[in-house]
Image: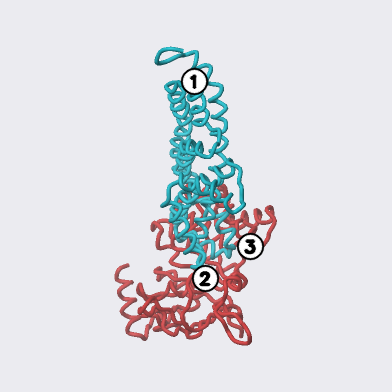
Chain colours: A red, B cyan
Amino acid sequence: MELMVRFEKVTKRYGSLVVLDALDLDVAPNEKVSIIGPSGSGKTTVLRMLMTLERIDDGVIYVDGEPLTHMPKNGTMAPASEKYLRKVRGKIGMVFQHFNLFPHMSAVKNCMEGPIRVLGLKRDEAYSRAEDLLGMVGLADKKNHYPAQLSGGQQQRVAIARALAMRPKVMLFDEVTSALDPEVIGEVLEVIRALSREHHLTMLMVTHQMGFAKEFSDRVCFFYEGKIAEQGPPDQLFGAPKNERTQQFLSAVLDAG
Amino acid sequence: MEGLWNWGFVWQTLPILLEGVVVTIQISVLSYLLALVLGLVLALLRRNPRFWISRPTGEIVEFIRSTPLLVQIFFIFYVGPQFGVTIHPWVAGILALGIHYGTYTSEVYRAGLEGVIKGQWEAAIALNLSKYHTYRDIVLPQAIPPIIPTLGNYLIGIFKETPLLSVITIAELLTRAKDVASDHFRFTEPYIMVGVIFLVLSIPASYFVNWSERRFKRGYGRK
């Protein structure tokens, strides 16, 4: 079966610090993968490299059968140029921990910018697409509000709608509830839950919400020191972790509540 | 025309000076527009990832900022003709002021661009926006409003530097005053009038800067 995402011996270093160490990771189409682990284990870096926000030092990432980090050139593979990246990264959408909405645009404008400028949609097409998506995340009545007029949970839902407006094949969620007040975390998770039920989307999620990871994912990957220390279906990973590091991490997180 | 202050001479001089004011304002506005555009171009070139573009741009900006405006005015006006390039005094004056102040506004733009947080650039990448649209739609609309008051101050700055152009025969306000004064051997009224006219014209400009500081401090959607 064709894979949606494939990391092949991917290494990322910051100076002498190895953040990802020859990582192999395969994700099937429509698969929901949660990435958990202690801070500094490289979880967020995985998403950032997929979104092409970071360059990789070694290895190759493939998305939907095409190399993402490299491009074919004169019969070999060369590091991807900016032009090539613009061609291939359209398959990926990302939602950030701090939302990163455009503060000078209303909710609906935030969702129209990409479709108009990148996909070439007409203004009214982009508008109705944005309206539909804002409706889906429960914010139809807030479409003309600026980000500053919305709560954190609402902003994050707009950010999800904005990413979806580009019709990506892979959605990345980077600690999307970490910056939120506890009482609004639920509304954001509910949107992601609905998304995974109703849409054919591959999803990768870095999260600290163990309960959500357990119910949402097909597979959970536990990262430790730039490697996948253990992975498996949530029942197995949370119920009967084999790796000692996983056991330590889970008991620490679950003790903390 | 006796005494220290002669009102008759003032009324006689005023129309001549007002003609100079028109020139001063025209030169100020045109130089300022050049400075605004050039400053942005320089700021963007300095951010270019290719060092052979960003480095020389930085050196040129530093060089122009470190040499006196008066020298630059002389240079543009008098050195050109030595090589067969004659420029109209107006063009020379506007170029000198516009380029000189363009290097200052480029630093202001630079500060504005650096004020746009990293997450905004990353969101633009995640939406796969081109560099052009990232700057035009995302970055500049956030970088420019906070620097409008500072940019406004440079309009006042340019305006107050225009008398320097009297050295290249431009008939701006000071030149007119000088001519009237030497024609009549009366210096008190014309030069005091020049001072008052600059003051009167600077007041609305400062008022605008203060207003814009208040206006652009508020973000979008905040009361």
Classify residue A253 by image quadrant: bottom left
Q: Chain of mark 3?
A: A
Front-lying residue, B92 or A137: B92
* Amino acid type at image mark 1: His
Q: Are marks 3 and 2 in contact (CB under 8 Å)?
A: no
Quadrant where the C terminus of chain A is found in the figure: bottom left
Q: Chain of mark 2?
A: A
* Amino acid type at image mark 3: Val
- Place of residue B144 in the rendered image (x, y in percent of width and height, measured from the top left): 50, 48
Mark 3 neighbour density, 10 Å: few (under 14) some (14–19) many (20 or more): some
Residue at numbered disc 2: A51
Please indicate whether residue A201 sits to the left or right of residue B161 in the image.
Answer: right
The residue shown at (46%, 80%) is A57
- Place of residue A70 in the rendered image (x, y in percent of width and height, measured from the top left): 56, 80
- Place of residue A185 in the rendered image (x, y in percent of width and height, measured from the top left): 43, 60
The residue shown at (66%, 63%) is A119
The residue shown at (65%, 53%) is A127
Rounded to the nearest whole Å, what is the CA distance between mark 1 and mark 3? 69 Å
Quadrant where the N terminus of chain A is found in the figure: bottom right
- Same subunit, labels 3 and 2: the answer reads yes
Q: Chain of mark 1?
A: B
Q: Where A230 sits versus A180, above or below? A: below
Q: Secondary structure at mark 3?
A: loop
Residue at numbered disc 1: B184
* Amino acid type at image mark 2: Met
Q: Where B35 sits versus A84, above or below? A: above
Q: Is residue A231 visible?
A: yes
Classify residue A245 by image quadrant: bottom left
Q: Is residue A201 visible?
A: no
- Same subunit, labels 1 and 3: the answer reads no
